[in-house]
Image (spheres, rainbow, N blue to C red):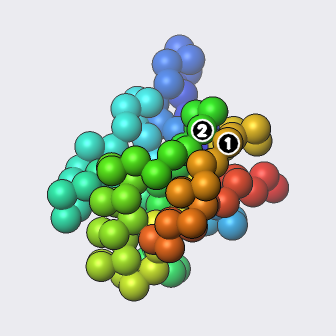
């Protein structure tokens, strides 16, 4: 994750990179609120069209929201929702691991 600030040190934007491509941007540290097909996601990988959700929490569970986002990604792109985890110690529930509409991967640091 790369943060951008003004000369006074005020946070203006945060950028998340995955596989060398920018996959998400947060303006003023405010989460994306634009809905697409009824769900809000963090970004799209331009080269592949994959939908991306970035998670930084201690655990990832197969919640109704994540299931819905995964199904929306598959419906829109034919590809599972790429869930990028920024926490190296994240615990992923077995149902989330087995959900075919989710592709859960750690953030690759370059």
The residue to which callout 2 is attached is 59
Q: Residue at x 23, y 50 (%)?
A: 34
Q: In which quarter of the image is the C terminus?
A: bottom right
- Front-most of residues 100 and 56: 100
Q: In the current view of this chain or complex, which residue is farthest to the right? A: 110
Q: Which picture quadrant has residue 77?
A: bottom left
* 81 is higher (above) or lower (below) than 64: below
Residue 44 drawn at (x, y percent): 43, 66
- Say which residue label 1 marks: 91
The one nearer the camera, 30 or 65, is 65
Image spot of residue 63 (x, y percent): 40, 47
Left or right of 54 on screen, residue 74: left
Residue 22 seen in this snapshot? no
- Residue lying furthest front: 94
The residue sitting at 69% across, 40% down in the picture is 90
Can you say whether 75 is above or below 12 in the image?
Answer: below
Residue displayed at 33% across by 49% down: 65
Mark 2 crowdedness (10 Å alpha carbons): few <14, some 14-19, many ≥20: few
Are the residues tagged 1 and 2 within 8 Å (C-beta)? yes
What is the x, y in percent for residue 43? 42, 58
* Residue in the picture at 60% in, 38% down: 59
| Label 1 or label 2, whichever comes before in sequence order | 2
Element carrying mark 1: strand
Tell me: 58 left or right of 30. Answer: right
Of 48 and 92, the residue lying toward us: 92
Q: Residues within 10 Å of mark 1 (few under 14, many from 20)?
A: few
Q: In what element is the residue under mark 2?
A: strand
């Amino acid at each position: 994750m790369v943060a951008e600030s003004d000369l006074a040190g005020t946070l203006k934007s945060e950028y998340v990179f995955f596989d060398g491509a920018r996959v998400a941007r947060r303006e003023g540290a405010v989460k994306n609120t634009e809905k697409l097909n009824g769900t809000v996601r963090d970004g799209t990988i331009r080269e592949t069209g994959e939908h991306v959700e970035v998670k930084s929490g201690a655990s990832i569970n197969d919640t109704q929201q994540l299931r819905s986002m995964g199904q929306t990604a598959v419906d829109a792109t034919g590809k599972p929702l790429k869930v990028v985890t920024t926490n190296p110690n994240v615990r992923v529930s077995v149902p989330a691991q087995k959900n075919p509409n989710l592709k859960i991967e750690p953030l690759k640091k370059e």
